[in-house]
Image (cartoon, rainbow, N blue to C red):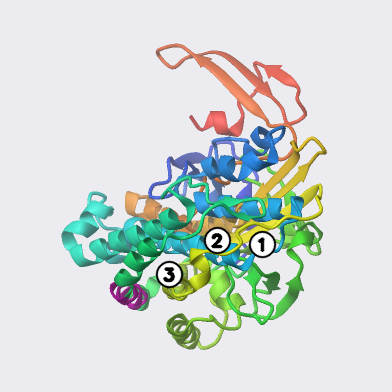
Amino acid sequence: MDTRPLETAADSKGLRRIAIDPLSRVEGHGKVTLLLDDDNRVRQARLHIVEFRGFEKFIEGRPYWEVPVMVQRLCGICPVSHHLAASKAFDRVVGGWPVPPAADRIRRLMHYGQIVQSHALHFFHLASPDLLFGFDAEVDRRNIVGVAAAFPDAARQGVMLRKFGQEVIRITSGKRIHGTGAIPGGMNRAVDPAERDALRAELPQVLAWAQDAVTLARRLHESLPARYADFADTPAAMMSLVGRDGAMELYDGVLRLREADGRIAIDGFDDQRYRELIAEAVKPWTYMKFPYRRDLGVDDGWYRVGPLARVQNCDFIPTPRAEEARQAFVAAHGGRPVHAVLATHWARMIELLHGVETVAALLDDPLITGGPLQAEGTRQHSGVGIIEAPRGTLIHEYEVGDDDLVTRCNLIVSTTHNNQAMNEAVRAVALRYLDGETITEGLLNHIEVAVRAYDPCLSCATHALGQMPLAVSLRAADGRVLDHVLRSSTGELLRDGPTHDAEAAQ
């Protein structure tokens, strides 16, 4: 389905505007706007990110050793991912890559704890209301309170799985949120044996819950009404880290890019050279960047990251239960590439199971309780850290001056990689389910369901290239606009001109 003509209406005059603002059950603030003609035909559909944070600029001028802690403030859901990606980048700067084996194991333990808690949060608390009650169910049921009332066991398992992941993070980083364990060149703490043993005691139950989560996700997916079989089916290339042997690898590996038809296009690509593979574009109606493959250009080079991409991009998962689940996922789809976004929930629970299995193996590794934790070597002036965060590939890149201050920072977070893919999903759903129909709240929720499948972290993803366009309006108490100033993307200040897209949406 070619959905790109829906990015911008040929003539927006006279079209009726519908806004889903804010998107619910996602992290951060975003909205979707639809423009419809008199016959309710969809003429334009966009996912907008309307908040701007500009962390890349905040970081410039700061001492490099502060950054692995600072960047955690990007997000309250996935701070560990930013903490570790920044630490990996600065490992290169201090000459401390590779870090000692003990530090590597502890960082991996922290990272897989993050995978478990984040995936549990999204599936059980944010996505399951749609899957358990239906996309058109009453609004007051489609939430975690409704799930807790109707499916208390599932709700409790979600809470307990997340709690387990948070405890793994605490014993490795020092705190459940915004810890300080990873430092450039290694770790500043090992795991306390008593805390390790306490988590080990929980593992049989946690593994059973994770296995049940895969079963539940598969059952819900396979019981979807037939009209949702191709829900937001948007073929896209798939990118992720993999191990050098093709295994699923979420902490450190090489980049692999697989075409939408399943062929491997690029494999074994060095993460430090990512800029030879990916470029970024901006558009005037959103603060989220649009990464694309350099070899295909901005129009054709978009791709997908995250669980649905990773489960299909790897050759195998190196833990037995998750690998069995991956093989069942592949067999259920006849071995063909899957691009219908609701399958992401099934893939996400396979990764959760892999996360728990990996945590179990690492808790048995004696290296996590001690050994050399830091490495150092010849200083460098730049470094790249890439990690597979819960939502997909996360890139941190830094340049550091002789005075130890950061001179340049570039972040491409998981949700940013998926920007075009999410817009394509919104347009596909708008055409399939809303076009020509009388718009209802339930139909609008279909749009949110498509975006929600990506588990977007919108507060992480609000960055822009170049001069930030800025619109400021002064309004009277009754809503009248008293003054309006627009700073364009070239830095020019305009007064009394047309409002910026973001401001016009108010």
> What residue is pinned by disc 2?
107
- Under mark 3, the amino acid is Leu
Point out which mark residue 146 bears.
none
Residue located farthest toward the front when viewing the structure as drawn = 371
Residue 356, x across and y down, in percent: 41, 71
| Tag 1 and tag 2, C-beta contact below 8 Å | yes
In magenta segment, residue 434: no
Identify the residue position indicated by label 1 in the image.
Answer: 99
User: What secondary structure is marked by label 3?
Assistant: helix
Circle nearer the N terminus (1, 3): 1
Kind of element beneath mark 2: helix
**Tally of numbered tags:** 3
Q: What distance separates the C-alpha of mark 1 from that of mark 3?
A: 26 Å
Instruction: Point out residue 62 in the picture as x, y percentages from the top left corner.
Output: 68, 34
> Magenta segment, principal secondary structure?
helix
Span shown in magenta? 204-215
Look at mark 3 in the image and give the residue it sits on. 352
- In the image, which is nearer the foreground, mark 1 or mark 2? 1
Check if mark 3's residue and mark 2's residue have beta carbons within 8 Å: no
